[in-house]
Image: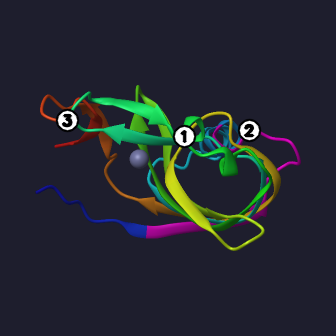
């Protein structure tokens, strides 16, 4: 187990740009505002979602829209939750999301590049304290937090 202690430093509330790639705009925002450790919460709507699912045997992400044509339509962001830490020397957002369609069906996954905003409102809590740094993990082949 690994854990570190932080104090709340700043809270940002805002909205994403229409047609923005969610992860790109989020990561740029974190870099620009020097948010190195934080908590992310988002609600809104998407023009397009790109979800990954980590195949624990193959040790790689598969894209869920391949198997679910329902994911290729506009969707609500019912809930998105994530964190900010340091990867490759700069702030990096790791985000998971539950989306819903016009019938209220819900889908979820790891948010990938290619997730496009229709409208999105965010709250980001920035913490102060020691950097939390991602590094390659042998067992999972994922970039996990290290001491
Ligand atoms: Zn993930």
The N terminus: image quadrant? bottom left
Q: CA distance from mark 2 to mark 3?
A: 27 Å
- The circle on residue 140 is 3
Residue 106 shown left or right of residue 86 in the figure: right
For this rendering, which residue is in front, 147 or 79?
79
Please name the residue that numbered disc 1 is placed on.
67
Mark 2 or mark 3: whose residue is earlier in sequence: 2
- Is residue 39 inside the magenta stretch? no
x, y (%) of residue 59? 27, 29
For this rendering, which residue is in front, 110 or 85?
110
x, y (%) of residue 132? 32, 46
Circle 3: element type: loop
- Is residue 12 inside the magenta stretch? yes
The C terminus: image quadrant? top left
Residue at point 42%, 42% (across, down): 53
Q: CA distance from mark 1 to mark 3?
A: 24 Å
Q: CA distance from mark 2 to mark 1?
A: 22 Å
The image shows residue 139, relative to residue 46, as above or below, that is above
Magenta range is 8-23
x, y (%) of residue 48? 75, 44
Q: Are marks 1 and 3 in contact (CB under 8 Å)?
A: no
């Amino acid at each position: 187990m690994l854990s570190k202690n932080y104090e709340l430093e700043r809270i940002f509330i805002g909205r994403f740009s229409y047609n923005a790639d969610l992860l790109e705009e989020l990561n740029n925002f974190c870099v620009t505002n020097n948010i190195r450790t934080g908590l992310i919460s988002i609600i809104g709507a998407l023009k397009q979602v790109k979800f990954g699912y980590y195949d624990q045997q193959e040790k790689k992400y598969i894209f869920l829209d391949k198997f679910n044509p329902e994911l290729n339509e506009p969707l609500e962001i019912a809930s998105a939750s994530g964190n900010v830490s340091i990867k490759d020397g700069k702030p990096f957002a790791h985000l998971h999301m539950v989306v819903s369609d016009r019938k209220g069906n819900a889908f979820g996954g790891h948010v990938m590049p290619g997730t496009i905003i229709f409208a999105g409102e965010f709250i980001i809590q920035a913490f102060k304290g020691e950097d939390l740094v991602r590094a390659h993990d042998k067992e999972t082949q994922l970039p996990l937090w290290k001491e």
